[in-house]
Image (cartoon, rainbow, N blue to C red):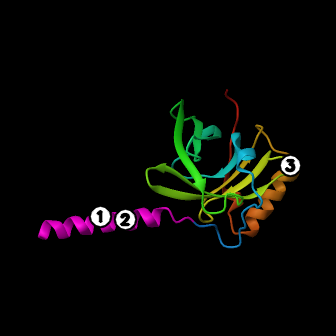
Amino acid sequence: MKSTHVIATVVAASAVAIALSSFVKIPKGAIAVKPFDQKKYLGKWYEIARLDYKWEKNLDNVTATYSLKENGDIKVDNRGYNFKKEKWEESIGKAKPVADPEEARLKVSFFGPFYAGYNVIALDKDYKYALVVGDNTRYMWILSREKTIPETIKQDYLAQAKALGFRTEELVWVNHDKN
């Protein structure tokens, strides 16, 4: 009887953890792009700048390639060169819309059932440049289809991020000097 109670408690706790891990947010004041064409967003993006965090520490030449999987989810292939270890690193994950597929709010997972927010809050009409934020003001990326970004777009994205409370002075500007 006691072991049944323990198993039920573990199952219930696991269910709560999974449910909470799939709940993703958008920073206060940020608004995701809408309408959003998921298919136009697919393909390769170069990371121009980011607020650094442990999974991307010491990485340059960072790219993210998004492709559609058969089940409708998006395959996320993040790749970067670790200049301290002098080797390429890669992380494969998955993404799916948080709710409305025409709103640029995705939940992304690299670790099983645990998801994080991926919110596109600025995107040009040709899907060449994007400003992406996570669940809070600790995660931010400026992306481009090319290894550079026009200064006017860069300044616009920086102003938008700063207005939302992001510490743009702490951005890591990514080098793209390897193939």
Q: As drawn, is 85 to the left or to the right of 15?
A: right
Type of residue at label 1? Val
Q: Position of residue 21 (x, y in %)?
A: 46, 62
- Disc 3 is placed on an element classified as helix
Residue depth check, mark 1 versus mark 3: number of the one nearer the observer: 1
Q: Residues within 10 Å of mark 2 (few under 14, many from 20)?
A: few
- Confirm whether the magenta stretch covers residue 19: yes
Give the residue furthest to the bottom.
28
* 62 w.r.t. 6: above or below: above
Q: Position of residue 93 (x, y in %)?
A: 53, 45
Counting residues from the start of the chain, the first of labels 3 and 2 encountered is: 2
* 24 w.r.t. 95: above or below: below
Q: Residue at x 27, y 65 (%)?
A: 10
Type of residue at label 2? Ala
According to the picture, the residue beneath numbered tag 2 turns out to be 15
According to the picture, the residue beneath numbered tag 1 turns out to be 11
- Confirm whether the magenta stretch covers residue 11: yes
Q: Residue at x 69, y 69 (%)?
A: 165
**The N terminus lies in quadrant:** bottom left
Q: Which residues are magenta?
A: 1-24
- Disc 2 is placed on an element classified as helix
Counting residues from the start of the chain, the first of labels 1 and 3 encountered is: 1
Q: CA distance from mark 1 to mark 3?
A: 52 Å
Residue depth check, mark 3 versus mark 2: number of the one nearer the observer: 2
Task: Report the predominant secondary structure element of the magenta stretch.
Answer: helix
The number of callouts visible is 3
Q: Residue at x 84, y 46 (%)?
A: 126
Q: As drawn, is 107 to the left or to the right of 178?
A: left
According to the picture, the residue beneath numbered tag 3 turns out to be 151
Q: Position of residue 58 (x, y in %)?
A: 56, 42
* 106 w.r.t. 74: above or below: below
